[in-house]
Image: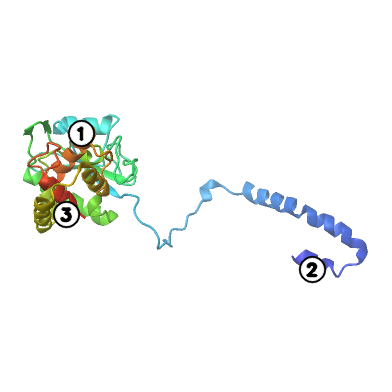
């Protein structure tokens, strides 16, 4: 603004020339800017981190638990050398060894095609923890040692605290991919974790209340069960049919919250736990 102000005081004769100069101003600024840039070197880049914004939180929102279905040596080799990985690996040694294979700020490749509360890119926002455990099938599953679970609990407390992870976002691979996965399996002690203050659990008194209610009113229909599963985060069909996909989701839910039977049948206890979970 200053040059135009001064122009008012100049004789009329000079004004058109000044107007032309004013028109050139953007060009002049660009030239000056380029001149400044030419003396700038990226080596001089300085970032001031002394002030941190109040409004921020962790990019990590979920923890996904897995079993490796193989031994210590093979698990470590696969998770560090192949196109699959996890942030942490806990061995099944008498004194479990905890490896960190991927930095928490980076994405590990452990979730695959999965979904939780509508979120699909689970690798992007989660920490993956693999437990060395042989897994199993049908009624033949490898148990987890108490020491390995205690180690996991210590690790979980640390990760949860640092990233402020919500209890309902601590899940098993089977919860987020019930059509493909069963790990960490029905012997994984979710209740023990809940007793240590980790993850989502239900009040038994609430379950008993709903069991009595079902005795009076009958069991909820399949669509109601599907709606409850969806409310709790699961990706489930909403067709009112007890089809294969729905049974897989119910079985995943049972493995997590009622592992005594995980046949995918929505019995009274399953329906009551579903309703009791908040
Ligand atoms: Zn898994």
The residue tagged with tag 1: helix, strand or loop? Answer: helix
What residue is shown at x 52% (from left), y 51% (from top)?
44
Comes first in the chain, label 3 or label 1: 1
Q: Nearer the viewer, residue 134 or 141?
A: 141
Residue that sits furthest to the front in the current view: 217
Do the CB atoms of the residues marked 1 and 2 lie less than 8 Å apart? no
Let me know if residue 161 appears in the view.
Answer: yes
> Is the residue marked 2 within 8 Å of ligand 1, measured from its CB?
no
- The quadrant of the image that shows the C terminus is bottom left
Q: Looking at the rendered structure, which numbered label has been put on residue 276?
A: 3
For the residue carrying disc 1, how many other residues have a C-alpha within 10 Å: few (<14), some (14-19), or many (20+)? Answer: many
Viewed as shown, does residue 38 lie left or right of 22?
Answer: left
Q: Locate residue 11, reporting x and y percent.
A: 91, 67
Give the CA separation, mark 2 to mark 3.
75 Å
- Residue beneath disc 1: 76
Q: Looking at the rendered structure, which numbered label has been put on residue 182?
A: none
- The quadrant of the image that shows the N terminus is bottom right
What residue is shown at x 29% (from left), y 38% (from top)?
114
Q: Nearer the viewer, residue 168 or 164?
A: 168
For the residue carrying disc 3, how many other residues have a C-alpha within 10 Å: few (<14), some (14-19), or many (20+)? Answer: some
Q: Locate residue 52, reporting x and y percent.
A: 41, 61
């Amino acid at each position: 603004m200053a040059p135009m102000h001064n122009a008012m005081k100049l004789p009329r004769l000079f004004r058109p020339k000044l107007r032309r100069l004013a028109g050139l101003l953007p060009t002049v600024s660009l030239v000056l800017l380029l001149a400044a840039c030419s003396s700038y070197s990226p080596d001089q880049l300085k970032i001031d981190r002394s002030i941190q914004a109040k409004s921020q939180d962790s990019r990590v929102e979920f923890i996904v638990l897995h079993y490796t279905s193989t031994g210590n040596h093979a698990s470590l080799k696969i998770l560090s050398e192949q196109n699959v990985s996890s942030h942490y690996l806990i061995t099944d040694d008498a004194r479990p060894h905890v490896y960190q294979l991927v930095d928490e700020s980076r994405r590990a490749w452990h979730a695959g095609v999965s979904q939780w509360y509508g979120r699909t890119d689970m690798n992007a926002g989660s920490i993956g923890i693999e437990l060395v455990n042989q897994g199993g099938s049908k009624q033949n599953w490898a148990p987890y040692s108490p020491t390995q679970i205690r180690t996991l609990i210590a690790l979980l407390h640390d990760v949860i605290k640092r990233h402020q992870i919500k209890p309902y976002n601590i899940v098993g691979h089977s919860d987020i991919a019930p059509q493909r996965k069963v790990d960490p399996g029905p012997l994984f002690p979710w209740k023990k974790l809940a007793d240590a203050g980790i993850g989502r659990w239900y009040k038994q008194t609430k379950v008993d209340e709903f069991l009595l209610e079902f005795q009076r009113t009958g069991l909820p229909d399949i669509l109601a069960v599907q709606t409850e599963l969806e409310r709790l985060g699961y990706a489930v069909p909403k067709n009112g049919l007890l089809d294969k996909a729905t049974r897989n989701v119910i079985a995943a839910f049972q493995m997590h919250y009622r592992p005594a039977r995980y046949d995918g049948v929505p019995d009274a206890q399953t329906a009551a736990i579903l309703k009791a979970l908040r």
